[in-house]
Amino acid sequence: GGNAAYGLNLGGNGGAGGKAGLFIGTGGAGGTASTGGVAGIGGPGGVGNLFYNIIGIGADGGAGGDAFGATNIGGQGGQGGWGNGQFFSIGGNGGAGGNALTFNGTGGPGGFGGDGGGIFGIGGAGGNGGGALMGGRGGVGGIGGIGGLFGIGGAGGNGFGAPDLAFGGNGGQGGYGGYFFGFGGAGGNGGIGNTPGIGAPGGFGGYLIGGPIGKRGITPA
């Protein structure tokens, strides 16, 4: 669990451990709260080796965001990906929750880690949630891509930090890792500005070819 510094604070709870399986992910650490903030909860660990799987490895949940200053809320850590492929599959780690600073800020939640599928599939890591200032809300971290047969899923994009009374853009989802060492492209990061731009999703990782990287989010005028 996280720490509660000074008075009237709530430290973040530690994330739950992964469910039954041969190899399970650990829960993410809770965030730290200070001067009246509420820290983010750590993300739960992923699940490994379900049913017919052989050596499926669940990934770790992301850490909860810190809340510094009054009435702040730290972002929740993302869930670790599951190792649910047929053979040697590894989930991607969950993204960290965003930190909330000054006051009335809400950190964005971290993205979920991608699942490892197929054979030797590795899920992409979830993106980190955006930080927040003075009433802003950080963007959501993108979800990591799923790893295919010998494929590696792309990482989710990071949510953008939000300034005063603004909403940060969400990160894009990582691309799917395709067959035979295909690498999924990373999701784009969230856009800048007072309205939430959305990061573009990462591209599919095809046969022996890496997928394109998603573009940064476009902020509406």
Image (tube, rainbow, N blue to C red):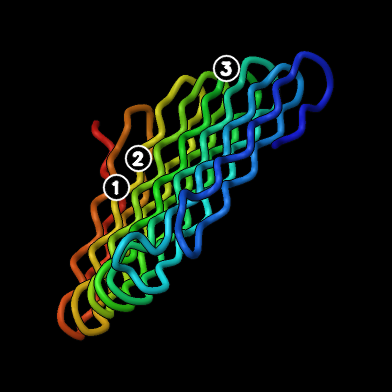
Q: Position of residue 114 (x, y in %)?
A: 35, 57
Point 32% across, 32% down: residue = 196
Q: Residue furthest right?
A: 6
Which image quadrant: the C terminus?
top left
Q: Mark 3 = which residue? A: 104
Q: CA distance from mark 3 to mark 1?
A: 25 Å
Q: Earlier in the sequence, mark 3 or mark 1?
A: 3
Q: Who's the residue at 42% across and 60% down the image? A: 48
Where is residue 71 shown, x and y percent of the image?
63, 15
**How would you rate the neighbour count of disc 3 (Cα within 10 Å): few for under 14, some for 14-19, many for 20 or more?**
many
- Binning the other alpha carbons within 10 Å of mark 2 as few (below 14), some (14 to 19) or many (20 upward) gives many
Which of 104/192 is in front? 104
The residue at which mark 2 appears reads as 170
Residue flagged by tag 2: what amino acid is it?
Asn
Q: Are marks 1 and 2 in contact (CB under 8 Å)?
A: yes
Q: From the viewer's perspective, is residue 196 above or below residue 213?
A: above
Which corner quadrant holds the N terminus? top right
Question: Which residue in the protein does label 1 denote?
Answer: 199
Whether residue 186 can be seen here? no
- Please say whether residue 109 is visible from this viewpoint: yes
Q: Nearer the viewer, residue 16 or 43?
A: 16
Q: Looking at the rendered structure, which numbered label has been put on residue 114?
A: none
**What is the C-alpha distance between the residues marked 1 and 2?**
6 Å
Residues at marks 2 and 3 touching, judged by CB atoms closer than 8 Å: no
Distance, label 2 to label 3, CA atoms, is: 19 Å
